[in-house]
Structures are given as C-alpha cells and as structure tokens.
Amino acid sequence: MTDAPTSSYLPWMTEGHEYFMSVLKRTGDEQLEGPSALPGWTGRHLLSHVGHNARALVRLAHWAATGEPTAMYPNPSARAEEIEAGALWPAARLRDFVEDEQVRLSVALDRLTRARWQAQVVTAQGRTVPATTIPWLRSRELWIHACDLPSGGDFAEFPHDFTDALIADALTRRRTAQSVEVGVRATDRETDAFPRGDLIVEGPSADLARWLTGRGTSPHLRTTTGAPLPQLPPWL
C-alpha cells in the first residue's frame, strides 16, 4: 500500500471480527448444528454466510483496486447457493473459513491507495458506494451476526458510536420498505441525530438497534403515541 487508508470504518470492522470470534469461541460445535437466531438457519448456515460475505467483499475490494467491475455475486442465486453449500462443511472448517476470509479481506483493503478508496463499487443490493463503505458493510455483518450465533452476543456490548451509526443506517433502510416512517429517540443518549418520523419509538439505544435490525423487541421500548410496537423482520 502506498498511501494511508481513508475509511473511518476500519476499526469497527476489526473490533467486530474480534467480537464475533469471541462469541464463536464460546459456541460449541454441537450448538452450531442447532438453530441460530435467524429463521431457517443453523449455526453452520450463519458461519457459512459470514465467511462467504467476506469473500464477496474481497471482490468489491478488487473492483476498487483495479477498476475492473467485479460483482459481489455472479448471479442472483449465488449467495444462497454458497451459504447452503458451506453449511454442509464440518464445524472446524467453518471456523477456519470465517477467520481466513476475514484475513483475505483485510489484506485486500490494506492494498488500496488513498485514491482507490474513493473508487465507486456496486453492492449486492445495487447501491453505488465508494470503497470506503466496504468496511462498514462488513462491520454490520460481524456485530449483528455475533448476536445471531447460538450462544448469542449482546447489542449492549457494541461500541456506542457504532450503535448510533447502525441505528441511523437501519432507519434509512426501513424507510424504503415501510409504509409508515419510523423515527427513534434514544433515552440513554443526549442526541438528536436520529431522523424523526410518523411513529416515534423511545428506548435504550441497544434495544433500538436490536429492534430496528429485526432481532426482537424489548419491554424498555415504547411508542410515544402508545401504539403497538411494530414487529420488524430480520435485516441482514
């Protein structure tokens, strides 16, 4: 690498991988055979997804580095096919796979020059973003899916600034899919950073992040109108 990286998301990615692996370490192989927190997925499905996600983001890093368009997945069904194939691997192979693919991604990003960090790439959802966004995409996967592992991480253990960024991102994504605009107010933060909406939900920031990403509600959350709290499907 010939220049310093310019993505502010790199520390969150590094910390997220460490957190994910710490939760995985306390997850036994027999637990990985059973269900994860995501409907229809075992723990092995989850590890396959996390490893293949890193591999897909390496393709975006290659695109950024070379200017050669390289999609995250070659076709619409490839993501699901990769996950299902990997879910058949032994647990030991999957553990190594997650670790090895994260190293490959870190190396690929470390090779980007300052200019190439600004190169435009296209995500699997069709969004055009600068390469600086790649570590953010990975950070979300690592921190959130740590909480989907059978032994379960905890949103309350996330860095506060990452949680705030996750809430803002989730609100943006939900607004494109919901008929009612949702806004939130974190009761443990002195901030007005989160957009307002037709329905305001109040509560601790960790519980807001958990709810907005479709990982369940909390008795600490409430709507300011007294309306029932909507159930949101998993995001990511």
Image (cartoon, rainbow, N blue to C red):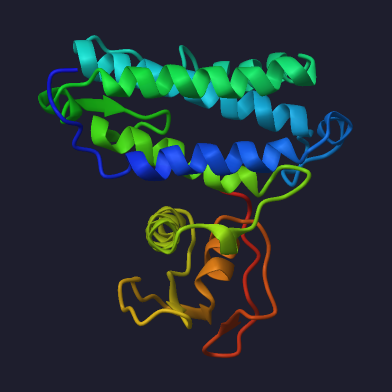
Q: Decide if residue 72 is in sight here.
A: no
Q: Is residue 54 above or below residue 78?
A: below
4 or 57: nearer the eye? 4
Quadrant of the snapshot with the C terminus: top right
172 or 36: nearer the eye? 36
Residue 110: where, in percent of width, then height?
A: 28, 23
- Residue 91 lies left or right of residue 210; in this view the side is right
- Residue 66 lies left or right of residue 155; in this view the side is left
Given the current orientation, which residue lies at the most extreme bottom position?
Answer: 225
- Residue 119 lies left or right of residue 131; in this view the side is left
Give the residue at x 47% y 54%.
177
28 or 235: nearer the eye? 28
Q: Is residue 174 above or below residue 228?
A: above
- Residue 100 lies left or right of residue 219; in this view the side is left
Give the residue at x 43% y 56%.
166
Within the image, what quadrant is residue 93 found in?
top right
Within the image, what quadrant is residue 43 found in?
top right
Residue 203: where, in percent of width, then height?
A: 54, 79
Residue 31: where, in percent of width, then height?
A: 85, 36
Residue 55: where, in percent of width, then height?
A: 48, 18
Give the residue at x 35% y 71%.
194
Give the residue at x 19% y 17%.
1
Number of labels in the image equals 0
